[in-house]
Image: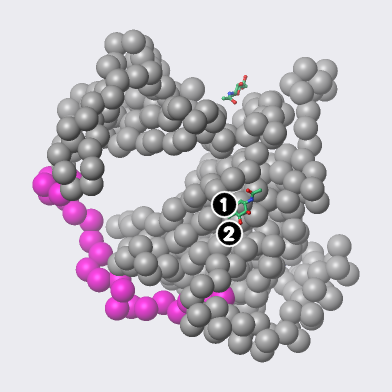
Amino acid sequence: MNSLVSPLLSFHRSFILFLNLLSLFITFSNCHIPTTLEGPFLPVTVPFDPSLRGDTVDLPDTDPRVLRQVVGFEPEQISLSLSTTHDSVWISWITGEYQIGYNIKPLDPKTVSSVVLYGTSKFELVNVAKGQSLIYNQLYPFEGLQNYTSGIIHHVRLTGEQYKWLERDLANVDRSVTPWLVATWHPPWYSSYKAHYREAECMRVEVEDLLYSYGVDIVFNGHVHAYERSNRVYNYKLDPCGPVYITIGDGGNREKMSIPFADEPGHCPDPSTTPDPYMGGFCATNFTFGPAAGKFCWDRQPDYSAFRESSFGYGIFEVKNETWALWTWYRNQDSYKKVGDQIYIVRQPDICPVRQRMYSDCVASF
Ligand SMILES: *[C@@H]1O[C@H](CO)[C@@H](O)[C@H](O)[C@H]1NC(C)=O
Ligand SMILES: *[C@@H]1O[C@H](CO)[C@@H](O)[C@H](O)[C@H]1NC(C)=O
Ligand SMILES: *[C@@H]1O[C@H](CO)[C@@H](O)[C@H](O)[C@H]1NC(C)=O
């Protein structure tokens, strides 16, 4: 594998100029959206622009702009997604007081009316639709939220050490029905920022093989208050069948933005300071292969990091069909026309076969 990576990198270096020109062309022509099929991409860092930071402060809870507008179990945030059948949509919502305690029983869906008011943009909501609602989360923690399928996406929620549960869950996904596997958890594995650098290594060591063998397509993480998108990667090696990792912890935070990178001089953290106490101790040893072999940090943007920018922002993930999805990242101040980062994430089930195992087969192995 080692010998595969080096030629790849030197190939890249000799084509730097060509690719730079190509990316200039892409920027100016603004008509080609890159796809992961064209990757791996040379790392890009958009320099931090202090003028974009503005007066980022937390509004106090009493500020009318952040006060909750709803009471009790009225919906606070509604999510709509397409169902597999053409005549229905999935409606889910988050409601009520957030985290008011543990062991709270979910509401009986029958006691919650399912009414959606709708209308044309900018006009009054004059239409009413009533129907079945799937109430997967009134309050958390709630077991049912850990995995759910909306439309053609199966969502797997990882919290703590739930390896066996996760394996059973992944084995249960029929990829001919639910092609996309999107995983999300808090601390990123493939972030190159100094903040929280390699803190979740123990989790990565435990779980990465499993996610890879079941062909997880995309991973969303937070924790680091900035934006970063990876090339397809597995065990720190560029791999056309690895997931794309997106650090999207850039919603805004009073701890301010994450700006320094671990690969900048003087910013590589001391390995002993990095373990996350909630992530099972110390696993972050120095790299044993690749350009950072023998060291804890790279001396330039790692090749797994395709794009990074310190800015607050948000993204939209649009599944187009069973193999193509469009990921678009916007800086907070961007309009929808002004895109910070955009790529088609393309699944290749033909060259990246996915482990398909029925649950009954794996019972015996436990
Ligand atoms: C969620 O996981 C359980 C196993 O823990 C499985 O029985 C169930 O079918 C899964 N639900 C969905 C919607 O995949
Ligand atoms: C790990 O790398 C760091 C520099 O990143 C270095 O100071 C340290 O000595 C290395 N540790 C080992 C065991 O090689
Ligand atoms: C999937 O969607 C992409 C992007 O919209 C499109 O280019 C591609 O042809 C579609 N593929 C199939 C099999 O529909």
The amino acid type found where label 2 is placed reads: Tyr
Indicate left or right for 335 with 272 as reference: left
Q: Quadrant of residue 55?
A: bottom left
The residue shown at (80%, 51%) is 351
Is the C terminus in the top left, top right, bottom left or bottom right quadrant? Answer: top right
Q: Which residues are magenta?
A: 44-66
Residue at numbered disc 2:
344
Q: Quadrant of residue 73?
A: top left
**Residue 38 colored magenta?**
no
Q: Which mark is residue 325?
A: 1
Q: Quadrant of residue 189?
A: bottom right
Disc 2 within 8 angstroms of ligand 3 (CB): yes
The residue shown at (66%, 89%) is 17
The amino acid type found where label 1 is placed reads: Ala
Give the Cα separation between the discs numbered 2 and 1: 6 Å
Disc 2 to disc 1: CB gap under 8 Å: yes
- Mark toward the start of the polypeptide (2 vs 1): 1
**SS for callout 2:** strand
Residue 270 makes an appearance in the image: no
